[in-house]
Amino acid sequence: MAERIQLQLENGVTSEFPRGITGKEVVEALFPEKAAAAVGVELNGVIYDLSRPLQESGRLRILTFEDEEGRQIFWHSAAHLMAEALEALYPGIKFAIGPPIEQGFYYDVELPEGVTLSAEDLPRIEDKMRELAARDVPFERLEVSWEDAVRYYREQCPNPYKLEILHELRGQPITFYRQGNFVDLCRGTHVPSTGMLRYPKLLSIAGAYWRGDSRNPMLTRIYGICFPEQEQLEEFLRLRQEADRRDHRKLGRELELFLLTPAVGPGLPIWLPNGTVVRRTLEAFLRREQLKRGYQEVITPHIGNLQLYKTSGHYPYYADSQFPPMRLDEHEEYLLKPMNCPHHHQIYAAKPRSYRELPLRLAEFGTVYRYEQSGELNGLVRVRGFTQDDAHIYCTPEQLKEEIKAVVDLTQYVFRIFGMPVDIRLSFRDENESKYGGDRALWERAQREIQEVADELGLEYTIGIGEAAFYGPKIDFIVRDALGRRWQLGTVQVDYVMPERFGLEYIGPDGQPHRPVIIHRAPFGSLERFIGILIEHYAGNFPFWLAPVQAVVLPITDAQHEAAYQLAERLQEAGYRVQTDVRSERLQRKIAEAEHRKIPFLLILGRKELQTGTIAVRQHGVGDLGSRSLEELLRWFAELNVPGAERSHAG
RNA sequence: GCCACCGUAGCUCAGUGGUAGAGCGGCUGAUUUGUAAUCAGCGGGUCGGGGGUUCGAAUCCCUCCGGUGGCUCCA
């Protein structure tokens, strides 16, 4: 074996080093400015601790907190630091798993008999973590035999969880990591020493089943995050605060958009007048867009014969997440509809279809009911009764790709209107046959066609294996909101299964019956969920075209009341949503209250305005704009009253 | 559904075994006001529901309901 290895570094230069040199030594020799920030290295795709000897030639990347992999190392180490703190504070605690996650880390633990943790205990654990980090002790990697590892967790430090993990690693060499007094079974990698983990923050505490299986015992999960610099921690906490400030449940109450009350039932939202404006405006926007694109709108009932869902195959798959059927007699049971598709299929099947009628695009704002588990309910984002912007496209196999393209185009258009960037995921099946219905060959075909469309459109996408619906693969649209949070919204699904199950046919040019293909699609997904997200995206500051109340007229004294009513009436006639505030309050108060309500425009009428025939305009988030004529205002309003208009305007 | 925590006026919250409170909102009146909250008065609560401990429970215990954070699930 050669005594020297060649390492190609990030700057493109290849240098020679003695075999067994550590990452730390390479960094110190060639990139001293990175030495303090480096958390590990990647060599030929394998991630190493900085202290590990490198044995082979190849490309070497130096990882810091700026790299995805570096952050994972950093947070994984922070999880160990938290574990050390927990062990110091709660002797006898048992550790299960403590991985890094997208934003931080958690550790699942079994607390000693009689001990419970609540959020109030977190600062104490954090203090301990800071104290331990200040000692700045190294993380050490220890290789032990499998037998020694098992002995350790059986005798010295009894821990059933670690033993269960070890049993899956039987016979393999095992690594432990130690920092200070804390030793943990761990594959690694870790930062060089605890001193890097100076700015931890523990975020929440939750229950979590061991291995995510509800048959297993419930462990206590503690979530946290950690940063190398204080400013990063502060920025993170600031963003979290901002997210709290935008919480749609809070804004929904303050702006009187919707109501959730146990009197009606958990997860069953009531749309208040303001929220109804937002929802109807969104519906009108999409309806108009769909009509332009050749959709026909339909309306179907909220319940349907249970047989319909047995035919579709949904019922056995999802019996647990449906409201129980209503039983009329032994032969007749009805279900609150959990989806619209079977109803739409009846429309297709109501008469013989010719290939000349296809594609048939049936759209419905269809309200559906699903019995979501109580712990899942969350404001408007997760509810038990919601309205899908649903449509089913029945087309020939030859038309499929063009139709998918048109649907992708519509979906992208829609999210552009709201200024939400979209990431696309192709959701394909995995090997678990029991999760899916239909013929394997048709699945392959649908997946191939979806991917071809994505490629032909030049989409950037990722592929999610195992994310498919039970009857077909999907294109999922994952949007990012104003805070950069990701939400899975729109979906396009290709379905060869339902046409079979419902025996759908069309007569082709050859005079013979053929099976159509169905595309299920919903750009918003659920109006409730989408509006919940939209409230947070806009922080309640709806753009003009969506705002429940677009302008409030504020007369300064009684002398302007008549003029105020006239102005409001004029604007209402022009189609705007306008109110008038004639209370005997000072202007300041009227403005303050209207600003709290996030009204886009305040139209102020005083003595001056009546004399000059103008309107003093104040815009939400901008302030006093000075005076305008009514004509100017109407022109501006007309420009703004268009979906997406605000994106080309200030404010 | 499971675990932890929480539930006091419309909203935000104080009150930890001894007569239920504040601010905002609401109502009534005064005030006629120029770009983020005028003044005064008046209402308003089975302290989430039920049960228990106690001379006495918003406060302690049990149970149910609802909410929050997660876990599991997601057509």
Image (cartoon, rainbow, N blue to C red):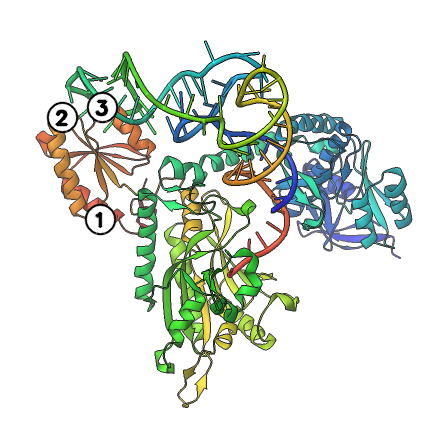
Which of discs 3 and 1 lies nearer the camera? The answer is: 3
Whichever of callouts 2 and 1 sits on the residue coming sooner in the sequence is: 2
- Residue behind mark 1: A638
- Residue behind mark 2: A558
- Residue behind mark 3: A585
Residue positioned 52% across, 73% down in the render: A497
Question: Badge 1, how many Cα within 10 Å: few under 14, some, many 20+?
Answer: some
**Looking at the image, how many numbered discs can be counted on the residues?**
3
The subunit letter for the residue under badge 3 reads A
Whichever of callouts 2 and 3 sits on the residue coming sooner in the sequence is: 2
Label 2 – label 3 distance at C-alpha = 10 Å
Which quadrant holds the C terminus of chain A? top left
Question: Quick one: which residue is furthest to the bottom in this view?
Answer: A510
Where residue A225 sits in the image (x, y, percent)? Answer: 63, 37
**Three-letter code, disc 2:** Asp
- Left or right: residue A521 versus residue A138 is left
Where residue A481 sits in the image (x, y, percent)? Answer: 46, 46
Question: Which of the labelled discs sits on residue A326, or is there none?
Answer: none
**A508 or B42: which is nearer to us?**
B42
